[in-house]
Amino acid sequence: MYEVMVGAERAEPMIRYFAEFGFTVRDSATFSAARAKELYGVDSPLTSYRLQNGAVDSHGLLRLLVWEKPLGRGVGYSIPETIGSRMSVMMTNDVIRIVDVYKAERSRGKPWLPMEPIFDDLYNMGDASPGFFQRPVGVRETVVYGEFFNHVFFQRYGYAIPGYGTINPAAPLQTSEFTHHDFFIAAPNMDVTNYYRDALGLKPEKPATVDGDWLKGPQRVFDMPAGYSHLYIGFVSPNNICGKLKFFIPQAPKPDRSAHQRVGELGITLHSLYTPKLALVYDLVKKQGIKPTALLTNEFGERCFVFKGPDGVTWQIIEKTSTTWKPTTTFELKRVNN
């Protein structure tokens, strides 16, 4: 995943907010209403800001789409696993501090819902009887649901994954670039995600599986009631271990706000990938029966196209040949002593 794109009414508060996580503006550009209509389907002037976290320019960036005439309020503040909602994930050095910050915001009447962090050994690396000298190995994670953004934060203990999250030392909240992304969709099965494999070249981690309240991490993060489950599938890039995509289909009734999951509304409404072979990917997308825009130029002067997949997710595919930051392609678990 190259960028998360967030619709906004004003730039300054959003730039200030994401600066606390280490994001700084690297570029800005404007688009006329006519050009925004052609590429995004939104008849509104647009000012965009591309933000980067530290030196990482190969993935995990943020683009603010400041619409002069937004189409609506977006999915907004909603309960966990609301259909149409999106979540983006960052690594941190201090997950407890972040939860305390959002608890303080909530106490001031701000629409943030932080969940208590949960510890889990995702890779079964821990000792059978952990103690002081054989300390627990795992990850502590939390989610913070908000009006314009849903955050997931995680902190690792006892291990590292080189290239999967790079903490920005200048970030006040000791956070990284976006490391992976969650999408809540409505569909009878995960066949609607096949185009990630067949057109975009991503690799499914494994076949779609059912997760539920018996898994303590998902149970806490998604606030699962007893007896609840969802269908899950994840995709990774062969060119970068970071930037994983995770898709969830709730197996019990959830609010459906997918009508507001569209470009031009506020909140997370669009994501981007890049490729050095834009024309090839364009043809592969069309072969999936998907109707993209024409090959056009975005507000930053990049050749691209936009489409909405059968899963309800909107993508901008950008032509790009290289980045300064070299992504890691080999997944490696390394023990650390903390």
Image: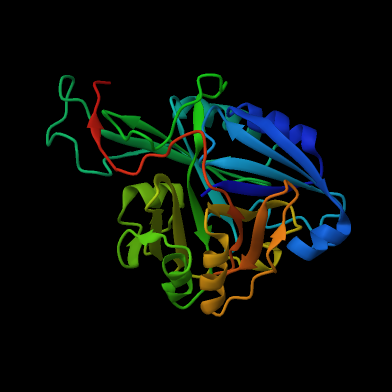
Where is residue 8 drawn, in percent x and y?
Answer: 76, 46
Q: Residue at x 52, y 59 (%)?
A: 277
Where is residue 167 drawn, in percent x and y?
Answer: 46, 27
Tell me the quarter of the picture where residue 127 sits.
top left
Can you see residue 82? Answer: no
Judging depth in this view, the residue of 238 and 108 nearest the camera is 238
Where is residue 318 drawn, in percent x and y?
Answer: 60, 54
Q: Residue at x 32, y 58 (%)?
A: 205
Q: Left or right: 129 with respect to 102?
A: left
Judging depth in this view, the residue of 266 and 251 nearest the camera is 266
Where is residue 314 drawn, in percent x and y?
Answer: 62, 62
Tell me the quarter of the picture where residue 333 sits.
top left
Judging depth in this view, the residue of 226 and 15 nearest the camera is 15
Judging depth in this view, the residue of 128 and 45 nearest the camera is 45
Q: Quadrant of the C terminus?
A: top left
Reply above or below: 248 against 102: below
Colour convention: rainbow
Q: Left or right: 75 with respect to 180?
A: right
Q: Residue at x 65, y 58 (%)?
A: 304
Q: Left or right: 95 with respect to 214?
A: right
